[in-house]
Image (cartoon, grey):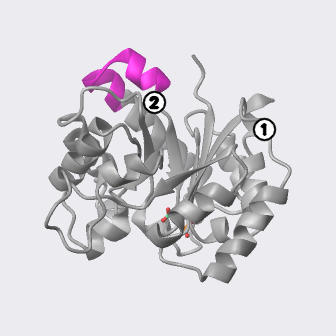
Amino acid sequence: MGRKFFVGGNWKCNGTSEDVKKIVATLNAGQLPSTDVVEVVVSPPFVFLTSVKSELRPEIQVAAQNCWVKKGGAFTGEVSAEMLANLCIPWVILGHSERRALLNETNEFVGDKVAYALSQGLKVIACVGETLEQREAGTTMEVVAAQTKAIADKISSWDNVVLAYEPVWAIGTGKVASPAQAQEVHAGLRKWFQENISADVAATTRIIYGGSVSGSNCKELAGQTDVDGFLVGGASLKPEFIDIIKAAEVKKA
Ligand code: PGA
């Protein structure tokens, strides 16, 4: 079974209702490859999730940017996985480096969140990635393997997980990983799956790249054997997101 190209748009904490209308209009008007070629998921802030879901063309799915680690209840300010499932929000992004760094989410906490979200029927875009210091210290594979293992320890199936490799030094910096740097880590993660989970999980799990993906660098990145798509931040708010989605055609050729 092939790994269908996957493009996620992470809007982060951006946008007014007017901005959101414009982005949705651009997405609805864009010429996209067919859903046989690419799976597209955009992730607006919680407050816009349901309106974006109802206004977007049906081929584009939506994701929440986070959810609570267990069943809802007395957790002020949180949104539970059950609520997302109840509203038919199919996807959630978990373990983003901004949450790991700014909100002190640990590997174990992220593992628990992924497991709970899956148990409620959500699909998960799980993020891993090293900091610049960790890369310079030569520990990139060790760091991403530990982040992936903390998830693997808590879940029994990878069927509904897309793994996003997002080097922290490349996020929002305009400093994209070179195609060779991305390929090296993606291949390393696939090998990790092969050695620690199964050959099947290694062959079928989509590993997508995130960190300053743009309309101008997406094709070359998409051409790498183990790059199965992208998680896009800044550029997902702009019309060039359509060009990034079209990079899926590189795989088809
Ligand atoms: P960026 O963000 O594309 O703005 O670098 C990527 C991400 O954080 O998912």
The quadrant of the image that shows the N terminus is top right
Within the magenta stretch, is there residue 198?
A: yes
Q: Nearer the viewer, residue 244 or 14?
A: 14
Magenta stretch bounds: 192-204
How packed mark 1 is, by other alpha carbons closer than 10 Å (few <14, some 14-19, many 20 or more), is some
User: Which numbered disc, 2 or 1, marks the residue that appears first in the sequence?
Assistant: 2
Q: Position of residue 2 (x, y in %)?
A: 60, 21
Q: Residue at x 53, y 42 (%)?
A: 183
- Ligand 1 within 8 Å of disc 2? The answer is no
SS under mark 2: loop
State how far apart marks 2 and 1 are (Cα).
Answer: 19 Å
Q: Amino acid at mark 2?
A: Thr
Left or right of 208 on screen, residue 52 = right
Asked if 132 appears above or below 32 in the picture, the reply is below
Q: Residues within 10 Å of mark 2 (few under 14, many from 20)?
A: many
Q: Which mark is residue 249?
A: 1
